[in-house]
Image: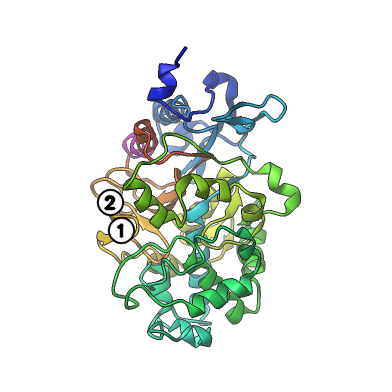
Amino acid sequence: MTNFASLLRPNRVTVFDPDSVTTTASDEVDASTADLAPSAVDAIWEAVRRLYLTGLHPGMAICIRRHGQVVLHRAIGHSHGNTPAGVDEERLQLATPSTLYNLFSASKSVTAMLIHMLDERGLLHIDDRVGDYVPEYAKYGKEPTTIRHVLNHRAGIALAGVDADADLSVLLDEGELVRRLCEARPQHVPGRRLAYHALSGGFLLAEIIRRVSGLHIRDFLDREIRQPLGFDHFQYGVPASMVDRVATDVFTGPVPPFPVSMLLERAFGAPVVEAVGMAASPTFLTACVPSGNVICTANDACRFFELLLRGGTLEGKTLFDPKTIRRAVHEQSYHEYDLVLQYPFRYGLGFMLGSANTSILGPDTPAAFGHMGFTNVVVYADPERDISVSFVNSGKPVIAVDALWWINVARTIAESIPKVA
């Protein structure tokens, strides 16, 4: 007999009773200690539960801090063993607050702050030319490219030949990646057009960090941020021995038809179903992809944005000057139309910004800054509400209508948590 529900809602995972697959972290405090009504937390969690019920995400985790207090820190669903192909009882594993997730493009904000850290120390300036640090890059019209251009998606190398290579082993050859970027011809004059750089910009920034600091970007991140703040992982990729700790990402929802499929392939660098499979592979998870594979817990991502929200000082450790953060989140694009994502975005220098109207960071969030990640990961801070937020998940829907319940989570957060004086 034809399952008409599956025709109307194709490619979903099995939905379990939400209460039976929910785990609450021990550090979650009563909302009233953070000047927040318990009903606000209840409303936000109900929005997360409603998204889970769509069957678009095997597992999700959310962590929210308000006035520095953890008011919501929970996981729902499974990290492994639940895919659109069915439930694998032998691999079925509950998602918990300690489950690792890939931040995907939200990694750009982490890499950007490493660059801003070097600027703060006077070791480079974001308006220096890339060729000042990577001389072999300065050719074929790329000579005027500045570090600022790379940070705000104006370098002209959005389609530079490193994003869509079907042979993922190239990710393990960082020298080859840099060579390709140096040999690439820009799609437009650097600085002229806004076009989202899915992966290419991160490799270039990592090479600049290596040449300026003498350290691989993993070692620099480890020394400057991960160790001082005692993150659980928070690193580009994982060792092979930890791959099974990372939640399995799966494509969900209907396959996009043409011409949507063409636009998505342009944005992701590969057909979307193939891109999800590549992103979930051990090769991608163990590589160093500075624009696309910081792997961590929801709590660690939330703490990173809490650090930025607090002006660069967290738990008695100062890592950034407040003006460094202000510069990083200062708007660069003013709702300019992004030629790759086909949508007008507000960008800072490594960040997506909120909006007075509506945005991926929720409505009425003009001061918020953060980043989304392929496709429903979002991490951000909103100074007006004094919150830091991390919402990570393992489903990768693109055009499913009920994926709009993901937008509802950010909307509920913005509408449930009042602004502070």
**Residue 318 vs residue 388: left or right?**
right
Locate residue 222, reporting x and y percent: 66, 63
Residue 316: x %, y % from top left: 59, 58
Helix, strand or loop at label 1? It is loop
- Name, please, the residue furthest toward the top: 1
- Is residue 411 a member of the stretch shown in magenta? yes
Look at 45% across and 32% down and name the residue there.
32
Q: Within 10 Å of the Cα at label 1, are there few (<14), some (14-19), or many (20+) other Cα atoms?
A: many
Rendered residue at 51%/87% (across/down):
135
Q: Identify the residue position indicated by label 1 in the image.
A: 346
Q: Does the magenta stretch include residue 279?
A: no
Q: Give the range drawn in magenta.
A: 410-417
Direction from residue 194 to residue 161 in the image, left or right:
right
Q: In which quarter of the image is residue 340?
A: bottom left
Give the distance between the C-alpha atoms of the residues marked 2 and 1, in whole angstroms.
8 Å
Three-letter amino acid code of the residue under disc 2: Ser
Q: Answer yes or no: do the residues labelled 2 and 1 have beta carbons within 8 Å?
A: yes
Task: Say which residue appears at 44% left-offset and 54% top-offset.
Answer: 268
